[in-house]
Amino acid sequence: MGSRLCSPLIWCISFTLIFTYVLQLKSMADGLEKISAVVVLSTQCVTEEIVVSLGGLLYFQDYKAMNSVQWGFFVSGNVTAVVCVIVLTHFKLKREDERVNGLSFPAKVVTDRRDESYSLIMADDAEEPLVLTSEPNTPDSQC
């Protein structure tokens, strides 16, 4: 067991895994700051599935046993996943642009939603905290 841990290949793979995990977290955080979570998570999931399927295909050398029909299913499945994420991203960004430009909702709805969100924020900043008790709050009640 000790001789396996001394292998440079194990250390190289371990370092690569840790490095790519940290980069994945950073890219996910950066993406969530700039784009909708629907786009970021869909892109990450499709990318991960394609990498995993290619890794398994290469590691277990399944490509040697695949016939043309299986290759067709494999390639078409991966292409379909990528195209679907691209279409989803296009529709989501188009919808967000419409909302920003005020084309999707009437101004009254946007204003009402904004007022509701401000009232929730103002309720959070209230000076007196809201206390929920099972007894009615009367001056005669004793704690």
Image (cartoon, helix red, strand yellow):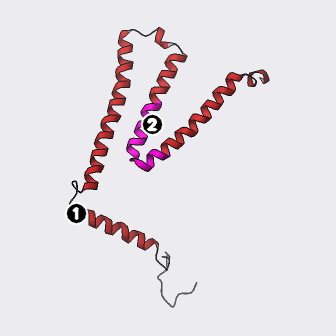
- Residue occupied by mark 1: 107
Quadrant housing the N terminus: top right
Q: Residue at x 37, y 19 (%)?
A: 75
Q: Quadrant of residue 105?
A: bottom left
Q: Main secondary structure of the magenta part?
A: helix
Residue 33 in percent (x, y) is at: 44, 50
Task: Locate residue 87, reporting x and y percent.
Answer: 30, 36
Side (left or right) of 139 relative to 46: right
In the rendered image, residue 65 lying in the magenta stretch gets the answer no
Q: What amino acid is at disc 1? A: Ala
Query: In terms of depth relative to the viewer, which is nearer, 6 or 100?
Result: 100
Residue 110 appears in which quarter of the rendering?
bottom left
Residue 109 spot, x, y in % from top left: 24, 63
User: Which sits in the foreground, 52 or 15?
Assistant: 15
Residue at (30% x, 40% y) in the render? 90
Residue 40 is left or right of residue 141, and the answer is left
Q: Which mark is residue 41?
A: none
Region of the chain picked out in magenta, as a range: 29-48
Residue at the limit of the structure toward the bottom, as seen here: 140
* Secondary structure under the numbered disc 2 in the rendered image: helix
Q: Nearer the viewer, residue 43 or 100?
A: 100
How packed mark 1 is, by other alpha carbons closer than 10 Å (few <14, some 14-19, many 20 or more), is few
Label 1: which secondary element: helix
Tell me which label, 1 or 2, sits earlier in the chain: 2
* Between 138 and 1, the one nearer to me in the picture: 1
Q: Residues within 10 Å of mark 2 (few under 14, many from 20)?
A: some
Q: Could you tell me which residue is drawn at 55 percent across and 38 percent down?
A: 23
Three-letter residue code for mark 2: Gln
The vertical placement of 133 against 16, above or below, is: below
Q: Is residue 67 left or right of residue 11?
A: left
What whole-number distance in Å separates the C-alpha atoms at marks 1 and 2?
35 Å
